[in-house]
Amino acid sequence: MTHLITSLNSFTSGAGDVESIQTTISRTKDNLLQISYLIKGRIEKLKIPGHSSTRRADRLWQHTCFEAFIGVAGDPTYYEFNFSPSGEWAAYSFRAYRDGGPLQDITWSPEIVVRSEADRIELDAVVLLEHLSSIHSGTSLRLGLSAVIEARDGTLSYWALNHPGAKPDFHHPDSFTLELAFPSQGA
């Protein structure tokens, strides 16, 4: 298993009631991608969707959601996954920068588990990489991890590994700063 821990950075200096967002990401030999997002802060001041149902939905980024952008080094194609604390999710496929749409013919759904306490909320998601046509077993991944956090007053804050532009743009190729190798046989 290949395993990394990193932190997301807020796009603006006024991140409100969020103290930090930490991510943990693992890739297993059976080509599963496991991602955990941990928000620490004044959770009661945030607008966190309650669990409703595990189903596909669009426009999750308009409220609190967590995102993973997955590609392979040297290849302009990539995938975007959105995970809501409600259990809703979305999946998109892109041929190049913002050139794509909903991932078609998806017969599985990511696993999403949410845990919360007074000062933290954690969302775990599992993605089956074998169902993504440009991701092959043995290849190294390039990843962009991000989050949109909604305050109770409706204000949104944008968090990512890297913010390369003048405004939040999680699709920007320079946002894909994390490299995750395929686990070696000895690992």
Image (cartoon, helix red, strand yellow):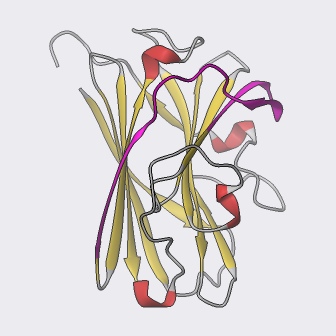
Q: Identify the residue shown where x is 62% and y is 19%.
A: 105
Instruction: Say if the magenta span includes residue 106.
Output: yes
Instruction: Say if the magenta span includes residue 60.
Output: no
Asked if residue 64 lies left or right of residue 136, the reply is right
Q: Identify the residue shown where x is 69% and y is 83%.
A: 154
Asked if residue 7 lies left or right of residue 186, the reply is right
Vertical comparison of 10 with 144: above or below: below
Q: Quadrant of the C terminus?
A: top left
Task: Give the residue at the far front of this rendering.
Answer: 53
Q: Identify the residue shown where x is 59% and y is 88%.
A: 152
Q: Which SS type dominates the magenta stretch?
A: strand
Span shown in magenta: 91-116
Vertical comparison of 150 with 146: above or below: below
Q: Quadrant of the N terminus?
A: top left
Q: Is residue 82 visible?
A: no
Asked if residue 33 lies left or right of residue 178, the reply is left
Residue 157 position within the rendered picture, expressed as x and y whole percent measured from the top left: 65, 73
Viewer-side residue, 31 vs 163: 31
Quarter assignment of residue 159: bottom right
Quarter assignment of residue 142: top right
Task: Give the residue at the far left of this rendering.
Answer: 186
Residue 158 position within the rendered picture, expressed as x and y whole percent measured from the top left: 65, 66
